[in-house]
Amino acid sequence: MMFRVKWKITLLFVLITLSIFFSLLANSDRFMEFRGNQTYTQTGAGVSGEGLIINLINRLEADNHETRLSAAAELGKLGGLAANHLVEKIESNNSSSEKVNSYMLLALLEIGDDRAENILSENFEKIEASNQAANEGAAEEWKQGISENTLQAIEAKDMAIRKYIADSVAMDSARAGNKGKTNAFERALKSEIQNSSIYVPFALSDFGPEEPGSETEKLLKALKSNKGSTRVAAMMALGEMGEEAAVDPILGILTRDYPPAKASATIALGKIGDERAVEVLRKEMKDGDNEYVKGGSAIALGKIGDENSVPFLINRLRDQRIKVRSSAALALGKIGNETAVKPLIEILETGKSSDGKKNKSMNANADIRKSAVLALGEIGSTDATETLIGILTDKEEELEVRAAAASALGNIEDPRALEALKKVLDDKNMDTNIRNATFLALNKTRDQETARMLVGKLGDQEFGAIAREVLIDIGELAAGPLIENLKTEDQKLKAETALILIEIGDKRAVQPLILAYQ
Protein backbone atom coordinates (compact mmCIF):
# COMPACT_ATOMS: atom_id res chain seq x y z
CA MET A 1 0.00 0.00 0.00
CA MET A 2 2.77 2.37 1.00
CA PHE A 3 4.59 1.59 -2.24
CA ARG A 4 1.50 2.55 -4.34
CA VAL A 5 1.18 5.88 -2.55
CA LYS A 6 4.84 6.73 -3.19
CA TRP A 7 4.47 5.71 -6.84
CA LYS A 8 1.43 8.00 -7.29
CA ILE A 9 3.23 10.92 -5.64
CA THR A 10 6.25 10.43 -7.92
CA LEU A 11 4.01 10.30 -11.00
CA LEU A 12 2.22 13.47 -9.90
CA PHE A 13 5.55 15.25 -9.39
CA VAL A 14 6.71 14.23 -12.90
CA LEU A 15 3.48 15.49 -14.46
CA ILE A 16 3.75 18.84 -12.65
CA THR A 17 7.39 19.21 -13.74
CA LEU A 18 6.50 18.47 -17.37
CA SER A 19 3.63 20.96 -17.21
CA ILE A 20 5.96 23.71 -15.92
CA PHE A 21 8.59 22.87 -18.52
CA PHE A 22 6.18 23.13 -21.49
CA SER A 23 4.72 26.34 -20.07
CA LEU A 24 8.20 27.89 -19.86
CA LEU A 25 9.00 26.69 -23.37
CA ALA A 26 5.87 28.37 -24.75
CA ASN A 27 6.66 31.58 -22.90
CA SER A 28 10.23 31.39 -24.18
CA ASP A 29 8.99 31.21 -27.76
CA ARG A 30 6.78 34.24 -27.16
CA PHE A 31 9.76 36.04 -25.54
CA MET A 32 12.01 35.27 -28.51
CA GLU A 33 9.28 36.48 -30.87
CA PHE A 34 8.97 39.70 -28.82
CA ARG A 35 12.77 40.08 -28.70
CA GLY A 36 12.96 39.58 -32.44
CA ASN A 37 10.34 42.27 -32.98
CA GLN A 38 12.20 44.57 -30.60
CA THR A 39 15.46 43.98 -32.46
CA TYR A 40 13.70 44.68 -35.73
CA THR A 41 12.40 47.95 -34.32
CA GLN A 42 15.87 48.89 -33.12
CA THR A 43 17.52 48.20 -36.44
CA GLY A 44 14.76 49.83 -38.43
CA ALA A 45 13.81 53.47 -38.54
CA GLY A 46 12.14 53.57 -35.14
CA VAL A 47 13.07 55.69 -32.14
CA SER A 48 14.53 52.69 -30.28
CA GLY A 49 16.93 52.13 -33.23
CA GLU A 50 18.25 55.67 -32.92
CA GLY A 51 18.67 55.22 -29.19
CA LEU A 52 20.77 52.10 -29.72
CA ILE A 53 22.93 53.87 -32.32
CA ILE A 54 23.50 56.90 -30.09
CA ASN A 55 24.40 54.59 -27.22
CA LEU A 56 26.94 52.74 -29.38
CA ILE A 57 28.44 55.98 -30.73
CA ASN A 58 28.80 57.16 -27.12
CA ARG A 59 30.65 53.91 -26.36
CA LEU A 60 33.21 54.92 -29.00
CA GLU A 61 34.21 57.68 -26.53
CA ALA A 62 35.18 55.10 -23.87
CA ASP A 63 38.78 54.85 -22.70
CA ASN A 64 38.96 51.12 -23.34
CA HIS A 65 40.16 50.02 -26.79
CA GLU A 66 38.22 46.73 -26.71
CA THR A 67 34.99 48.55 -25.82
CA ARG A 68 35.46 50.95 -28.72
CA LEU A 69 36.30 48.14 -31.13
CA SER A 70 33.21 46.18 -30.06
CA ALA A 71 30.99 49.26 -30.45
CA ALA A 72 32.34 49.84 -33.97
CA ALA A 73 31.56 46.22 -34.87
CA GLU A 74 27.99 46.52 -33.50
CA LEU A 75 27.43 49.75 -35.42
CA GLY A 76 28.59 47.90 -38.53
CA LYS A 77 25.53 45.63 -38.25
CA LEU A 78 22.97 48.47 -38.07
CA GLY A 79 23.07 49.71 -41.65
CA GLY A 80 22.06 53.02 -43.19
CA LEU A 81 20.57 54.74 -40.15
CA ALA A 82 23.82 54.20 -38.20
CA ALA A 83 25.82 55.39 -41.22
CA ASN A 84 23.84 58.65 -41.32
CA HIS A 85 24.56 59.33 -37.66
CA LEU A 86 28.25 58.54 -38.10
CA VAL A 87 28.61 60.70 -41.22
CA GLU A 88 26.90 63.61 -39.46
CA LYS A 89 29.22 63.32 -36.44
CA ILE A 90 32.37 62.92 -38.57
CA GLU A 91 31.52 65.87 -40.83
CA SER A 92 30.62 68.11 -37.89
CA ASN A 93 33.98 67.23 -36.31
CA ASN A 94 32.04 66.67 -33.11
CA SER A 95 34.04 63.82 -31.55
CA SER A 96 36.18 64.32 -28.47
CA SER A 97 39.43 63.36 -30.24
CA GLU A 98 41.03 62.23 -33.50
CA LYS A 99 41.31 58.75 -32.03
CA VAL A 100 37.53 58.53 -31.51
CA ASN A 101 37.09 59.77 -35.09
CA SER A 102 39.18 56.77 -36.23
CA TYR A 103 36.77 54.32 -34.58
CA MET A 104 33.82 56.08 -36.26
CA LEU A 105 35.52 55.71 -39.63
CA LEU A 106 36.07 52.02 -38.89
CA ALA A 107 32.35 51.63 -38.05
CA LEU A 108 31.45 53.31 -41.35
CA LEU A 109 33.68 50.81 -43.17
CA GLU A 110 32.02 47.93 -41.30
CA ILE A 111 28.61 49.16 -42.53
CA GLY A 112 29.88 49.28 -46.12
CA ASP A 113 28.31 52.69 -46.79
CA ASP A 114 28.95 54.20 -50.25
CA ARG A 115 30.11 57.47 -48.68
CA ALA A 116 32.98 55.77 -46.84
CA GLU A 117 35.52 56.16 -49.67
CA ASN A 118 35.13 59.94 -50.02
CA ILE A 119 35.04 60.49 -46.27
CA LEU A 120 38.16 58.35 -45.76
CA SER A 121 40.00 60.26 -48.51
CA GLU A 122 39.07 63.62 -47.00
CA ASN A 123 40.12 62.55 -43.52
CA PHE A 124 43.38 61.07 -44.76
CA GLU A 125 44.20 64.37 -46.50
CA LYS A 126 43.65 66.20 -43.21
CA ILE A 127 45.82 63.69 -41.34
CA GLU A 128 48.56 63.98 -43.96
CA ALA A 129 48.51 67.78 -43.78
CA SER A 130 48.65 67.85 -39.98
CA ASN A 131 51.34 65.17 -39.82
CA GLN A 132 53.68 66.60 -42.44
CA ALA A 133 55.14 69.38 -40.31
CA ALA A 134 55.15 67.16 -37.23
CA ASN A 135 56.96 64.38 -39.11
CA GLU A 136 59.65 66.77 -40.35
CA GLY A 137 60.22 67.99 -36.81
CA ALA A 138 60.21 64.43 -35.48
CA ALA A 139 62.74 63.32 -38.10
CA GLU A 140 65.09 66.09 -37.02
CA GLU A 141 64.49 65.27 -33.37
CA TRP A 142 65.14 61.59 -34.16
CA LYS A 143 68.61 62.48 -35.45
CA GLN A 144 69.54 64.94 -32.73
CA GLY A 145 67.47 63.91 -29.72
CA ILE A 146 68.13 61.64 -26.79
CA SER A 147 66.25 58.42 -26.11
CA GLU A 148 63.61 58.29 -23.42
CA ASN A 149 65.46 55.70 -21.34
CA THR A 150 68.62 57.82 -21.22
CA LEU A 151 66.62 60.94 -20.46
CA GLN A 152 64.91 59.11 -17.57
CA ALA A 153 68.30 57.93 -16.26
CA ILE A 154 69.63 61.51 -16.30
CA GLU A 155 66.48 62.81 -14.61
CA ALA A 156 66.91 60.11 -11.95
CA LYS A 157 70.38 61.53 -11.20
CA ASP A 158 68.89 65.01 -10.80
CA MET A 159 66.18 63.60 -8.52
CA ALA A 160 68.78 61.85 -6.35
CA ILE A 161 70.69 65.14 -5.98
CA ARG A 162 67.49 67.02 -5.11
CA LYS A 163 66.67 64.42 -2.47
CA TYR A 164 70.14 64.84 -0.98
CA ILE A 165 69.61 68.63 -0.90
CA ALA A 166 66.16 68.23 0.68
CA ASP A 167 67.47 65.90 3.39
CA SER A 168 70.36 68.27 4.13
CA VAL A 169 68.03 71.28 4.38
CA ALA A 170 65.77 69.29 6.71
CA MET A 171 68.71 68.42 9.00
CA ASP A 172 69.81 72.07 9.11
CA SER A 173 66.28 73.18 9.96
CA ALA A 174 65.90 70.54 12.66
CA ARG A 175 69.11 71.75 14.30
CA ALA A 176 67.80 75.31 14.18
CA GLY A 177 64.38 74.28 15.53
CA ASN A 178 62.54 75.29 12.32
CA LYS A 179 61.57 71.87 11.00
CA GLY A 180 57.93 72.77 10.41
CA LYS A 181 58.80 75.64 8.09
CA THR A 182 60.76 73.54 5.60
CA ASN A 183 58.40 70.62 4.98
CA ALA A 184 56.87 72.28 1.92
CA PHE A 185 60.31 73.14 0.54
CA GLU A 186 61.43 69.52 0.95
CA ARG A 187 58.35 68.35 -0.95
CA ALA A 188 59.13 70.80 -3.76
CA LEU A 189 62.69 69.48 -4.06
CA LYS A 190 61.50 65.87 -4.14
CA SER A 191 58.65 66.52 -6.57
CA GLU A 192 58.81 64.78 -9.95
CA ILE A 193 57.35 67.87 -11.65
CA GLN A 194 59.82 70.72 -11.54
CA ASN A 195 59.20 74.37 -12.47
CA SER A 196 60.29 77.77 -11.20
CA SER A 197 56.95 78.58 -9.57
CA ILE A 198 57.37 75.94 -6.85
CA TYR A 199 60.64 77.53 -5.70
CA VAL A 200 59.92 81.27 -6.02
CA PRO A 201 57.83 81.58 -2.79
CA PHE A 202 60.66 80.05 -0.71
CA ALA A 203 63.37 82.11 -2.40
CA LEU A 204 61.51 85.39 -1.86
CA SER A 205 60.09 84.63 1.60
CA ASP A 206 62.52 87.07 3.29
CA PHE A 207 61.43 89.99 1.10
CA GLY A 208 58.49 92.21 1.94
CA PRO A 209 55.91 93.39 -0.60
CA GLU A 210 57.73 96.72 -0.84
CA GLU A 211 60.95 95.10 -2.12
CA PRO A 212 61.83 96.81 -5.43
CA GLY A 213 62.67 95.01 -8.67
CA SER A 214 61.27 92.29 -10.90
CA GLU A 215 60.94 88.68 -9.81
CA THR A 216 64.23 87.82 -11.52
CA GLU A 217 66.01 90.71 -9.84
CA LYS A 218 64.70 89.59 -6.46
CA LEU A 219 65.83 86.01 -7.11
CA LEU A 220 69.33 87.26 -7.96
CA LYS A 221 69.34 89.17 -4.65
CA ALA A 222 68.21 85.99 -2.85
CA LEU A 223 71.42 84.25 -4.01
CA LYS A 224 73.24 86.43 -1.46
CA SER A 225 70.99 85.40 1.45
CA ASN A 226 72.54 84.18 4.71
CA LYS A 227 70.10 81.24 4.66
CA GLY A 228 71.29 78.18 2.78
CA SER A 229 67.70 77.10 1.97
CA THR A 230 66.96 80.51 0.43
CA ARG A 231 70.04 80.35 -1.79
CA VAL A 232 69.10 76.83 -2.86
CA ALA A 233 65.52 77.86 -3.68
CA ALA A 234 66.73 80.86 -5.68
CA MET A 235 69.17 78.73 -7.70
CA MET A 236 66.54 76.10 -8.43
CA ALA A 237 64.08 78.78 -9.61
CA LEU A 238 66.66 80.58 -11.77
CA GLY A 239 67.83 77.27 -13.24
CA GLU A 240 64.28 76.32 -14.25
CA MET A 241 63.91 79.77 -15.82
CA GLY A 242 67.16 79.30 -17.78
CA GLU A 243 68.30 82.70 -16.54
CA GLU A 244 71.75 83.44 -18.01
CA ALA A 245 72.23 86.48 -15.75
CA ALA A 246 72.44 84.02 -12.85
CA VAL A 247 75.45 82.08 -14.20
CA ASP A 248 78.25 84.13 -12.61
CA PRO A 249 76.73 84.38 -9.10
CA ILE A 250 75.85 80.65 -9.17
CA LEU A 251 79.43 79.82 -10.18
CA GLY A 252 80.55 81.73 -7.09
CA ILE A 253 78.29 79.52 -4.97
CA LEU A 254 79.65 76.38 -6.67
CA THR A 255 83.23 77.29 -5.72
CA ARG A 256 82.67 78.58 -2.17
CA ASP A 257 79.41 77.38 -0.61
CA TYR A 258 78.52 74.33 1.46
CA PRO A 259 77.77 70.96 -0.32
CA PRO A 260 73.94 71.11 -0.61
CA ALA A 261 74.12 74.59 -2.16
CA LYS A 262 76.92 73.49 -4.49
CA ALA A 263 74.86 70.46 -5.56
CA SER A 264 71.94 72.77 -6.32
CA ALA A 265 74.32 74.97 -8.34
CA THR A 266 75.24 72.04 -10.61
CA ILE A 267 71.56 71.38 -11.36
CA ALA A 268 70.90 75.06 -12.10
CA LEU A 269 73.97 75.42 -14.34
CA GLY A 270 73.01 72.30 -16.28
CA LYS A 271 69.50 73.68 -16.83
CA ILE A 272 70.80 77.07 -17.99
CA GLY A 273 73.34 75.41 -20.31
CA ASP A 274 75.79 78.32 -20.54
CA GLU A 275 79.37 77.42 -21.57
CA ARG A 276 80.80 79.91 -19.06
CA ALA A 277 80.20 77.20 -16.46
CA VAL A 278 82.32 74.53 -18.18
CA GLU A 279 85.74 75.17 -16.59
CA VAL A 280 84.40 75.40 -13.03
CA LEU A 281 82.23 72.28 -13.49
CA ARG A 282 85.24 70.32 -14.80
CA LYS A 283 87.33 71.35 -11.80
CA GLU A 284 84.56 70.48 -9.33
CA MET A 285 84.01 67.13 -11.04
CA LYS A 286 87.72 66.31 -10.73
CA ASP A 287 88.68 67.77 -7.35
CA GLY A 288 85.43 68.01 -5.37
CA ASP A 289 84.86 66.08 -2.15
CA ASN A 290 81.13 65.48 -2.33
CA GLU A 291 79.86 62.70 -4.63
CA TYR A 292 76.58 64.50 -5.36
CA VAL A 293 78.40 67.67 -6.38
CA LYS A 294 80.89 65.71 -8.50
CA GLY A 295 78.15 63.63 -10.15
CA GLY A 296 75.97 66.70 -10.66
CA SER A 297 78.89 68.50 -12.32
CA ALA A 298 79.30 65.60 -14.76
CA ILE A 299 75.59 65.61 -15.64
CA ALA A 300 75.67 69.40 -16.07
CA LEU A 301 78.58 69.10 -18.53
CA GLY A 302 76.57 66.53 -20.46
CA LYS A 303 73.57 68.86 -20.64
CA ILE A 304 75.75 71.76 -21.80
CA GLY A 305 77.09 69.38 -24.47
CA ASP A 306 80.66 70.63 -24.50
CA GLU A 307 82.72 68.31 -26.77
CA ASN A 308 85.98 69.48 -25.17
CA SER A 309 84.80 68.05 -21.86
CA VAL A 310 84.82 64.48 -23.21
CA PRO A 311 88.41 63.64 -22.04
CA PHE A 312 87.60 64.98 -18.56
CA LEU A 313 84.44 62.84 -18.40
CA ILE A 314 86.33 59.77 -19.64
CA ASN A 315 88.79 60.27 -16.76
CA ARG A 316 85.83 60.21 -14.33
CA LEU A 317 84.92 56.72 -15.57
CA ARG A 318 87.69 55.65 -13.18
CA ASP A 319 86.39 57.68 -10.23
CA GLN A 320 86.19 55.79 -6.94
CA ARG A 321 82.56 56.77 -6.38
CA ILE A 322 79.73 54.93 -8.11
CA LYS A 323 77.55 58.02 -8.57
CA VAL A 324 80.35 59.91 -10.30
CA ARG A 325 81.34 57.05 -12.59
CA SER A 326 77.73 56.42 -13.56
CA SER A 327 76.99 60.13 -14.12
CA ALA A 328 80.09 60.56 -16.28
CA ALA A 329 78.95 57.67 -18.49
CA LEU A 330 75.50 59.21 -19.00
CA ALA A 331 77.07 62.61 -19.75
CA LEU A 332 79.28 61.00 -22.42
CA GLY A 333 76.18 59.46 -23.98
CA LYS A 334 74.44 62.83 -23.97
CA ILE A 335 77.38 64.47 -25.76
CA GLY A 336 77.64 61.54 -28.20
CA ASN A 337 81.33 61.68 -29.09
CA GLU A 338 82.72 58.38 -30.46
CA THR A 339 86.02 58.68 -28.58
CA ALA A 340 84.07 57.52 -25.51
CA VAL A 341 83.08 54.17 -27.09
CA LYS A 342 86.22 52.21 -26.20
CA PRO A 343 86.38 53.34 -22.52
CA LEU A 344 82.66 52.58 -22.10
CA ILE A 345 83.07 49.11 -23.61
CA GLU A 346 86.03 48.57 -21.27
CA ILE A 347 83.75 49.26 -18.28
CA LEU A 348 81.34 46.58 -19.47
CA GLU A 349 84.06 44.03 -20.21
CA THR A 350 85.94 44.47 -16.92
CA GLY A 351 82.77 44.31 -14.84
CA LYS A 352 81.37 41.17 -16.47
CA SER A 353 80.51 38.16 -14.31
CA SER A 354 81.45 34.69 -15.53
CA ASP A 355 80.70 31.05 -14.67
CA GLY A 356 78.05 32.16 -12.22
CA LYS A 357 80.60 34.13 -10.17
CA LYS A 358 79.79 37.78 -9.49
CA ASN A 359 82.58 40.19 -10.44
CA LYS A 360 83.61 42.25 -7.41
CA SER A 361 84.98 45.28 -9.25
CA MET A 362 83.12 48.59 -9.18
CA ASN A 363 82.33 48.16 -12.87
CA ALA A 364 80.06 45.25 -11.93
CA ASN A 365 77.66 47.72 -10.29
CA ALA A 366 74.28 47.68 -12.08
CA ASP A 367 73.92 51.48 -12.13
CA ILE A 368 77.35 51.94 -13.74
CA ARG A 369 76.72 49.18 -16.27
CA LYS A 370 73.26 50.47 -17.20
CA SER A 371 74.62 54.00 -17.65
CA ALA A 372 77.49 52.75 -19.86
CA VAL A 373 75.07 50.68 -21.95
CA LEU A 374 72.69 53.60 -22.47
CA ALA A 375 75.63 55.87 -23.34
CA LEU A 376 76.80 53.47 -26.04
CA GLY A 377 73.30 53.42 -27.47
CA GLU A 378 73.21 57.21 -27.64
CA ILE A 379 76.59 57.35 -29.39
CA GLY A 380 75.32 54.75 -31.85
CA SER A 381 78.64 53.26 -32.92
CA THR A 382 78.51 49.80 -34.51
CA ASP A 383 81.74 49.03 -32.61
CA ALA A 384 79.52 48.48 -29.55
CA THR A 385 77.04 46.11 -31.24
CA GLU A 386 78.59 42.78 -30.22
CA THR A 387 79.20 43.92 -26.64
CA LEU A 388 75.58 45.05 -26.29
CA ILE A 389 74.23 41.84 -27.84
CA GLY A 390 76.31 39.89 -25.34
CA ILE A 391 74.77 41.84 -22.45
CA LEU A 392 71.23 41.47 -23.82
CA THR A 393 71.53 37.68 -23.96
CA ASP A 394 73.62 37.16 -20.81
CA LYS A 395 71.46 35.63 -18.06
CA GLU A 396 74.03 36.60 -15.44
CA GLU A 397 73.43 40.30 -16.10
CA GLU A 398 70.89 42.27 -14.06
CA LEU A 399 67.53 42.57 -15.82
CA GLU A 400 67.66 46.38 -15.84
CA VAL A 401 71.05 46.27 -17.59
CA ARG A 402 69.78 43.80 -20.20
CA ALA A 403 66.66 45.91 -20.82
CA ALA A 404 68.94 48.94 -21.31
CA ALA A 405 70.98 46.91 -23.82
CA ALA A 406 67.80 46.24 -25.83
CA SER A 407 67.06 49.95 -25.89
CA ALA A 408 70.64 50.78 -26.88
CA LEU A 409 70.65 48.25 -29.74
CA GLY A 410 67.50 49.89 -31.08
CA ASN A 411 69.53 53.10 -31.49
CA ILE A 412 72.32 51.47 -33.50
CA GLU A 413 71.90 51.18 -37.28
CA ASP A 414 73.41 47.74 -37.64
CA PRO A 415 71.77 44.61 -39.19
CA ARG A 416 73.37 42.54 -36.41
CA ALA A 417 71.52 44.61 -33.80
CA LEU A 418 68.19 44.17 -35.59
CA GLU A 419 68.68 40.42 -35.95
CA ALA A 420 69.55 40.04 -32.26
CA LEU A 421 66.46 41.98 -31.18
CA LYS A 422 64.21 39.81 -33.36
CA LYS A 423 65.69 36.61 -31.95
CA VAL A 424 65.11 37.77 -28.39
CA LEU A 425 61.52 38.75 -29.18
CA ASP A 426 60.80 35.34 -30.69
CA ASP A 427 62.30 33.50 -27.71
CA LYS A 428 59.26 32.45 -25.62
CA ASN A 429 61.55 31.47 -22.73
CA MET A 430 63.03 34.96 -22.47
CA ASP A 431 62.04 37.11 -19.50
CA THR A 432 58.89 39.16 -20.26
CA ASN A 433 60.53 42.45 -19.24
CA ILE A 434 63.40 41.84 -21.66
CA ARG A 435 61.00 40.97 -24.47
CA ASN A 436 58.95 44.10 -23.77
CA ALA A 437 62.09 46.26 -23.88
CA THR A 438 63.10 44.52 -27.11
CA PHE A 439 59.70 45.16 -28.62
CA LEU A 440 59.95 48.88 -27.89
CA ALA A 441 63.53 48.97 -29.20
CA LEU A 442 62.40 47.55 -32.55
CA ASN A 443 60.24 50.66 -32.98
CA LYS A 444 63.45 52.65 -33.41
CA THR A 445 64.57 50.62 -36.44
CA ARG A 446 61.66 51.94 -38.53
CA ASP A 447 61.80 49.74 -41.61
CA GLN A 448 59.27 47.58 -43.49
CA GLU A 449 60.80 44.31 -42.37
CA THR A 450 60.33 45.29 -38.73
CA ALA A 451 56.83 46.58 -39.47
CA ARG A 452 55.92 43.25 -41.08
CA MET A 453 57.11 41.40 -38.00
CA LEU A 454 55.08 43.71 -35.75
CA VAL A 455 51.96 43.20 -37.89
CA GLY A 456 52.41 39.48 -37.27
CA LYS A 457 52.22 40.19 -33.53
CA LEU A 458 48.90 42.08 -33.62
CA GLY A 459 46.93 39.00 -32.61
CA ASP A 460 49.42 38.10 -29.87
CA GLN A 461 47.86 38.28 -26.42
CA GLU A 462 51.12 39.41 -24.83
CA PHE A 463 52.32 41.94 -27.41
CA GLY A 464 49.24 42.87 -29.47
CA ALA A 465 48.55 46.17 -27.69
CA ILE A 466 52.20 47.26 -27.83
CA ALA A 467 52.47 46.22 -31.50
CA ARG A 468 49.49 48.41 -32.33
CA GLU A 469 51.03 51.51 -30.70
CA VAL A 470 54.44 50.89 -32.27
CA LEU A 471 52.97 50.46 -35.77
CA ILE A 472 51.06 53.75 -35.44
CA ASP A 473 54.30 55.38 -34.35
CA ILE A 474 56.23 53.90 -37.31
CA GLY A 475 53.59 55.42 -39.59
CA GLU A 476 53.73 55.27 -43.39
CA LEU A 477 56.54 52.70 -43.44
CA ALA A 478 54.09 50.24 -41.86
CA ALA A 479 51.32 50.88 -44.42
CA GLY A 480 52.42 48.17 -46.89
CA PRO A 481 52.52 45.25 -44.43
CA LEU A 482 49.25 46.46 -42.86
CA ILE A 483 47.49 46.61 -46.24
CA GLU A 484 48.61 43.01 -46.88
CA ASN A 485 47.15 42.02 -43.52
CA LEU A 486 43.65 43.25 -44.51
CA LYS A 487 43.25 39.92 -46.36
CA THR A 488 43.06 38.04 -43.04
CA GLU A 489 39.98 35.89 -42.35
CA ASP A 490 40.05 36.93 -38.69
CA GLN A 491 37.46 39.73 -38.49
CA LYS A 492 38.77 41.20 -35.24
CA LEU A 493 42.33 41.23 -36.56
CA LYS A 494 41.10 42.85 -39.79
CA ALA A 495 39.37 45.56 -37.73
CA GLU A 496 42.56 46.15 -35.70
CA THR A 497 44.56 46.42 -38.92
CA ALA A 498 42.05 48.79 -40.53
CA LEU A 499 42.00 51.00 -37.45
CA ILE A 500 45.80 51.34 -37.47
CA LEU A 501 45.74 52.27 -41.17
CA ILE A 502 43.06 54.88 -40.44
CA GLU A 503 45.14 56.35 -37.62
CA ILE A 504 48.25 56.45 -39.84
CA GLY A 505 46.25 58.18 -42.57
CA ASP A 506 48.22 56.97 -45.62
CA LYS A 507 46.14 57.63 -48.77
CA ARG A 508 47.43 54.39 -50.35
CA ALA A 509 45.22 52.52 -47.88
CA VAL A 510 41.86 54.01 -48.99
CA GLN A 511 41.08 51.58 -51.83
CA PRO A 512 42.36 48.46 -49.99
CA LEU A 513 40.21 49.41 -46.98
CA ILE A 514 37.09 49.83 -49.15
CA LEU A 515 37.74 46.51 -50.92
CA ALA A 516 38.37 44.70 -47.63
CA TYR A 517 34.91 45.67 -46.36
CA GLN A 518 32.85 45.29 -49.55
Image (cartoon, rainbow, N blue to C red):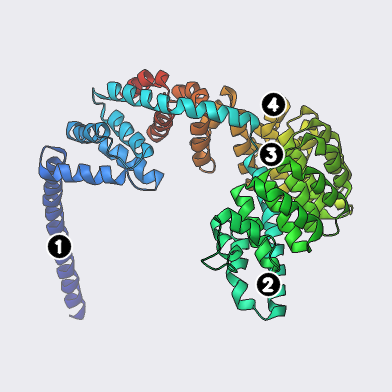
* N-term-proximal mark, 4 vs 3: 3
Q: Quadrant of the C terminus?
A: top left
Q: CA distance from mark 4 to mark 3?
A: 13 Å
Q: Earlier in the sequence, mark 1 or mark 2?
A: 1
- Camera-side residue of 389 and 58: 58
Q: Which residue is mark 4?
A: 413
Q: Nearer the viewer, mark 4 or mark 2?
A: 2
Identify the residue position indicated by label 1 in the image. 20
**Who comes first in sequence, dot 4 or dot 2?**
2
Q: Amino acid at mark 3?
A: Ala
Mark seen at residue 224: none
Residue type, mark 2 in image: Ala
Q: Mark 3 or mark 2: name the one nearer the start of the chain.
A: 2
Left or right side of 495 for 14: left
How far apart are the alpha carbons under marks 4 and 1? Answer: 75 Å
Image marks 1 and 3: residues in contact by CB distance under 8 Å: no
Residue at which label 2 appears: 170
Q: Secondary structure at mark 3?
A: helix
Q: CA distance from mark 1 to mark 2?
A: 79 Å
Q: Residue at x 59, y 23 (%)?
A: 449
Asked which secondary structure carries label 2, the reply is helix
Q: Nearer the viewer, mark 1 or mark 3?
A: 3
